[in-house]
Structure formats: structure tokens, C-alpha cells
Image: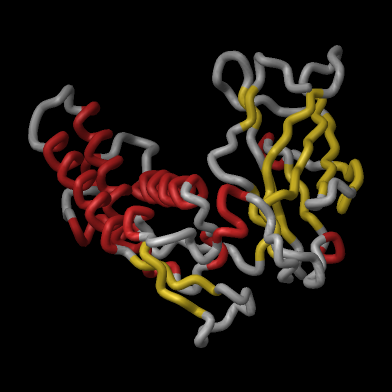
Amino acid sequence: MADLRYSMRASLPHFLTRGRENAIDDVVYGPTGAIATPSVGTITVYDESGAEAVTAAAATFPSSRPTYTVPAAAVPTTAPLSSRWQIRWSLTIDVDSSPLVFVREAHLVRSVFSCPVIPSDLTDAHQEAASLLAPGVDVQDFIRQGHEWVMRWLLRQGRLPWLMLDSSELFDVILAESLRRLFLDAHAATNGVGKYLELADRYAAEREAELARTTLTYDLDEDGLPGSDSEPIPVTPSVWLASPPWGSYLGGRRYSNGRT
């Protein structure tokens, strides 16, 4: 298993798109927090049944990151959509030690949810946004953090982002969370001087308000197309009158109806 001195960042599961090659990479950090470069390693990918879709394939390490491209044949379009795939890296980091195993969750999906927010959306909302950044920091960093936070929130609620037909439905939520993080960073960088904590609190409230009124159009029959089966569903659980329509997948459990 993995040595406790080393950690692998896992902010979201890996999303593997059916019927195409999927390039995946991860980052391992050592005891000092610096990126650790493996000397050699392999990857094994398990499907939802525990069968090996990829068996001990050799990884490469561009920019010190363990990297592998899952071939399309390993994720065929005939495989059922699932949140129960798994990726295992076996990596040798200390040349005199045994390989370390890092386990990552993976979902097999029809398409990957794309972030609808871009850097100019933050600077359009606040012209000073770019000037608040420390050297080496980019507005895109806060968008990535905001996007990841919203994706984790959806997954915790049992909502699968890859069944959404339109990522723009979460534009305002992701924008508010990205701005909240930007102004929290500015508040810390200025030692609490100025208006930035007030702005961060304002965008936290705006994020919650947007979540409360957002509806998500879900592809309930999983054909990837709009139609009578595509139903707008409120994102906030308090408005549900019964189990959510995607309840067979609630909490990350696989569909019980065998849909593919």
C-alpha cells in the first residue's frame, strides 16, 4: 500500500469517457510537500465488476506526473455507465523500497462535464481581479478550485454531473465560488486590510442562493440527447417530494435497471 509519507492528490474521481482514449495523470507529493517523481510504475484499471480493463500497463512520467492513456478498447461504448471503476497506480519512488500502491476512484461516463466559466468572467465581474494575484498565481487557479468544489458538492448529493445536458446551468454557482476563493486569498494576502472578506462573504451567500434556485437538466434515459426524457430537476434536496429521479444511482451506487 501507499507509504504515509507520500500522498496523491485526489480532488475528484477520474472520469473515463466510453469509446475513446482517455489520458489520465496524477501527482504524488513527498514528505516535504514537493512533487515526488517515480522512477518506474504501472497502472491497472478495474471495471465495475472488478475485472481488469487494463492490466499492469507501464506508466510514463512527463513533468514528474504518472501518466497513462487508457485505450478506447478498454472502455467500449457497450460497457454500462458506472461510478464504480477503480484505478491503481503501482509506483516505485524510493529506489531501495517496494512499489507503493495508490488507489483512485473512477467513473465510466458518456461525456465529461466541462467548466462553463473562463478567466474573463471573473475580470468582467471585478476589473481588479487580476491585480490581486500573487506572482505565479492565475485566475484560472480559482476557477479550477471553484469548479472542483461544485463537482464534489454534486457528487456528495448523489447528482452525477456527467448526466447533465448543459453545463451552463451551473455557471453562476461556479462563478460565485471562484470569486469567493479569489477574495479570500486577497484577504489573506493583505493581512485582512480592505473589503475582501466582505466580498468573499457576499459571494458565499450568492453561491448558496444560486444553488437554491438552480435546476439541472438530466439525461434520464442516458441517450445523450435532449427530449421528453430530459427533465429539469431542482438541485436543492429540500424541494424533493420523494426520492430523486436518479435515485438508483444515489450515493454512487450503480444503476439497478441495467441501463447502458
Q: Quadrant of the N terminus?
A: top right
Which residue sits at x=89%, y=45%? 57
Of residues 153 and 194, the one drawn nearer to the viewer in this rendering = 153
Which residue occupies the foreground of this view, 45 or 137?
45
In this rendering, would 167 be left or right of 91?
Answer: left
Percent of width and height locating residue 82: 70, 57
Which residue occupies the extreme bottom position in the image?
227
Left or right: 200 as drawn, with respect to 55 = left
Indicate the position of residue 153 as horizontal and vertical percent values: 44, 47
The correct choice, above or below, for 11 with respect to 257 in the image is above
Judge whether 233 appears above or below 90 on screen: below
Query: Which residue is rendered at x = 50% and y = 68% of the image?
Result: 164
Total tally of numbered discs in the picture: 0
Q: Nearer the viewer, residue 14 or 256?
A: 256
- On the question of residue 191 being in view, the answer is yes
- Quadrant in the picture for the C terminus: bottom right
Give me the residue at 80% from left, 62% from top. 75
Query: With 212 as the anchor, is 6 left or right in this view?
Result: right
Residue 117 seen in render: no
Measured as percent of width and height from the top left, residue 155 is found at 51, 49
User: Which residue is outermost to the left?
Assistant: 194
Compared to residue 40, the image places residue 108 above or below, namely below
